[in-house]
Amino acid sequence: MSQLRAPSPEERSKEAAVLYASLADLAIVVPMFIFGLATMSLTLISEAIRVALMLVVEFYSLFVLRAVHRDKLRRFRFGIGKIEQFCNLAIGAALFSSGLWIANHVLVTVLSGQAVATPLGLATAAVVNGVNTLINALGWFAMIAAARSDDSPVFKAQLRARKVKLTASMVVQVMITIAALVRDPVISLWFDAIGGSFVAVLQLSIGLAMMSEALPDLLDRSLPESLRQRIANAIKASGIAPEELVRVRTRRSGRMPHVELTLAPANCLGLEDFRQRCDQLQQAVTAILDDVEVTVGVDATRRRQAGSMSG
């Protein structure tokens, strides 16, 4: 069994940036719910629901990021694309449903014309959301400081998500602060409703996007013909003899293409020569595709022959 790779200091700093930002979100989401329900601020309740649902994505992304840095995903035959997309589908559905609930609640409140939140309650909600905005800003700056040009797609996605969260919390902060400062209860109600509507639209759009991306990838799909032809050309250019290549399997798991190649130990001078051929083939395929998972194995019917070469 191969040992796990130790993450580099830069990778550890990226993990720490994501972890601390997620823990800070976890610490603020509970007060947001408490004060949101106590003050009945539509904006704060909406933002608390969105933060809570996106926390699931953050912690799952942290798990994947740590696994990537330690090469733990090699044990999965075709990666964890389907698991990732299933989680995205569930979270997207939750975001979409909560967005509909928030929009309905905002509409009912506006049509009734009665402000539920008091000025003091809105002021308290503004302070709590201000803390949330500060946390998002600090988390974004921490991740920016740890970012590099060759970062993994998981970390880049987390960085983009943190930027969206910061922008959303700033817009919410403006709306809820204006609602707390104005003296006219009708205007206060409208600004609170606008803040809640903004979060509802944001949840609906994010939820719909997550579901639309996840549903197609949950189905088994073959790679496009043009991509399969590029892989075939790369294999041919690698110098591997046709009789050495026993099987080629390709598929798409999530958004990442996976290529499984099975080699026979024919014409190999020894085990080290066979390993070099495997590396040569793997490098040839990854050279033409940026995001691809390539697995090279030995033909099971000839393992005894491969094992005898090491003796």
Image (cartoon, helix red, strand yellow):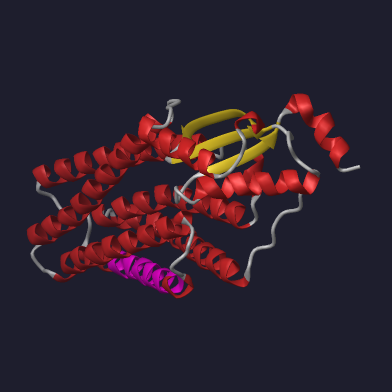
Does the magenta segment cover residue 208?
A: no
Q: Is residue 168 left or right of residue 237?
A: left
**Stretch in magenta:** 124-143
Q: Is residue 178 left or right of residue 149?
A: left
- Report the magenta stretch's main SS: helix
Name the foreground residue: 81 vs 54: 81
Whole-percent x and y of residue 154?
47, 54
Q: Residue at x 54, y 43 (%)?
A: 293
Quadrant position of residue 15: bottom right
Name the foreground residue: 21 vs 37: 21
Quadrant position of residue 159: bottom left
Whole-percent x and y of residue 12?
60, 67
Q: Is residue 113 above or below residue 5?
A: above
Name the foreground residue: 269 vs 177: 269
Does the magenta segment cover residue 127?
A: yes
Name the foreground residue: 95 vs 239: 239
Tag count? 0
Quadrant position of residue 208: top left
Whole-percent x and y of residue 20?
52, 66
Q: Residue at x 22, y 61 (%)?
A: 118
Q: Quadrant of the C terminus?
A: top right
| One can see residue 140 in this view | yes
Q: Quadrant of the N terminus?
A: top right
| One can see residue 121 in this view | no
